[in-house]
Image (cartoon, rainbow, N blue to C red):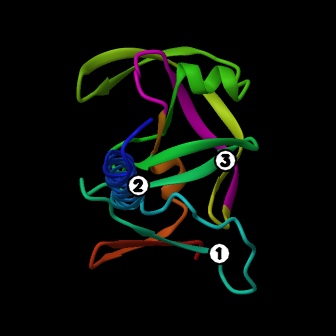
Amino acid sequence: MRHPDQTRRTTARLFQVAFWLLLLLAFALYFSGYLEQRDHPNRHLSLAETDGPSEVVLQRNRSGHYIAPGLINGHPVVFLLDTGATTISVPEAVARQAQLHPGRRSRVTTASGVIDVYQTELETVQLGNIRLDRVQAHINPHMPSDLVLLGMSFMQNLEMTQRDGTLSLRIP
C-alpha cells in the first residue's frame, strides 16, 4: 500500500505536467493562428456580392506580397498577385486539378530564364467579388508551387490603388 504523501506527490506532479502541456498547447494554437494571419492575411476573402462597384481590398503579407484565395473556372486556387507577369501563370498540377486544356506551346521569359509554357483561356477568374470571363493564361510545367501568378491579363481590366500595406482592386 502506498503512503498518502507519496500519492499526493504523484498527483501533484501529474497536475504539473498536465498544466505545462496544456499551456504549451495553448501557445501553439495561438501562435499558429498568429503566424497564419501574418503570412496569409487574405485567406478569408469573401466571395459575397455587393451592390456597388466590384472591389477587393487585400492586405500585404509579411513578405510584402498580396496572396489571396480565388477561383479559376469554379476551382479554388490561391493567387499571388504579380504585376510583372503578362498573363496568369497556372502551375501544371493546378491546371490538371482545374481540368484546364493546354493549347499551343510558346516560350516566355521569367526571372529563372526562358521556359516553355502552354497557352490556355480561362472561362472565369474570380478574386473576391471581382469576376472576369475569358481571360488569357498559360500553363507552366516548371512551377513547383501551387500558387497561381495572377498577372496583367486579369489586372489590366482593374483600377489598382496601393496604400499603407493594402491593395484595392476595382472594376472601373
Residue at 25%, 58% in the rendered image = 62
Instruction: Judge from the rendering whether residue 165 lies leftward or rightward of residue 150; answer left or right.
Output: left
> Is residue 91 visible to the viewer in this orientation of the structure?
yes
Q: Which residue is mark 1?
A: 54
Cβ atoms under marks 1 and 2 closer than 8 Å:
no
Q: Secondary structure under badge 3?
A: strand
Point out residue 118 in the picture as x, y percentages from the top left corner. 55, 18
When the figure is inspected, residue 126 is found, relative to residue 50, above or below; the finding is above
Compared to residue 22, the image places residue 109 above or below, namely above
Across and down, in percent, residue 163 comes to 30, 79
Residue at image location 29% in from the left, 72% down from the top: 165
Residue 52 placement: quadrant: bottom right
Q: Position of residue 5 (x, y in %)?
A: 32, 52
114 above or below 69? above
Could you tell me which residue is drawn at 36 percent across and 61 percent down? 34
Identity of the residue drawn at 66% across and 47% down:
71
Q: Which span of residues is magenta-colored?
A: 131-146
Mark 2 sits on what residue? 22
Horizontal side of residue 156 vs 131, given as left or right: left
SS at badge 1: loop
Q: Which of the marked residues, 2 or 3, is nearer the chain's N terminus? A: 2
Earlier residue among tags 1 and 3: 1
Front-most of residues 86 and 142: 142
Mark closer to the chain start, 1 or 2: 2
Q: Quadrant of the C terminus?
A: bottom right
Local crowd at mark 1 within 10 Å, few (<14), some, or many (≥20)?
Answer: some
Residue 117 shown left or right of residue 164 in the figure? right
Q: Are marks 1 and 3 in contact (CB under 8 Å)?
A: no
The answer to whether 120 is drawn above or below residue 43 in the figure is above
